[in-house]
Image (cartoon, rainbow, N blue to C red):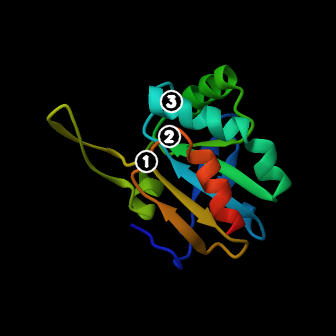
Amino acid sequence: MLSEGDQVPDFALKDAEGKTVKKSDLKGKKYVVYFYPKDFTPGCTTEAAEFSQDYKKFKTSGIEIIGISPDDEESHKKFGEKMNVPFILLADTEKDVAKKFGVWGKKQFMGREYMGVNRTTFLVDEKGKILKVFEKVKPAGHAQEVLDAFKN
């Protein structure tokens, strides 16, 4: 997994509207990249709702939010519309970006092992350097936790 001080790897993924968003588009901006397992699941819904609720606070602080999951653009479009998500949701259907960040791996649920996205958030500075990594994120209260981390 990427660590504090590492550079964000290059990426190019489509958003809910089918527009390609690249790392280079974010140059000179502070941003949050949060990886989540799946649209419309309880934890992911909570996390999206809290980031949406606090979005104005992030924007006022000059911080963009980007959510990435293996879901496709159509799923993100429906999820974004239902949840009134004001920020970017990117489709990593091939899991390439999740693998580059080191968040694709073995998971366990009810005694069953499988491969999936480990819920992780990265805070990134204007130069594309990772300032902080949140692993094993608990969705409730996470948006405020991330906002507080940027202030420190």
Seen in the image, is 39 located left or right of residue 111? right
* Gap between marks 2 and 1 measured at Cα: 9 Å
> Residue beneath label 3, please?
39
Residue 74, percent from left and from top: 58, 27
Packing grade of label 2 (10 A; few <14, some 14-19, many >=20) is: some
Q: Nearer the viewer, residue 63 or 39?
A: 63
Please tell me which of labels 2 and 1 falls first in the chain. Answer: 1
Seen in the image, is 117 located left or right of residue 48? left
Is the N terminus in the top left, top right, bottom left or bottom right quadrant? bottom left
* Residue 24 lies in quadrant: bottom right
Please tell me which of labels 1 and 3 falls first in the chain. Answer: 3
* Gap between marks 1 and 3 measured at Cα: 13 Å
Residue 92, percent from left and from top: 49, 45
Label 2 element class: loop
Q: Nearer the viewer, residue 80 or 43?
A: 43
Tell me the mark number nearer the camera, choosing from 1 and 3. Answer: 1
Residue drawn at the location 50% of the way across and 34% of the way down: 44
Label 3 element class: loop
Q: Residue furthest left?
A: 111
Q: Are marks 2 and 1 in contact (CB under 8 Å)?
A: yes
> Residue beneath label 1, please?
119
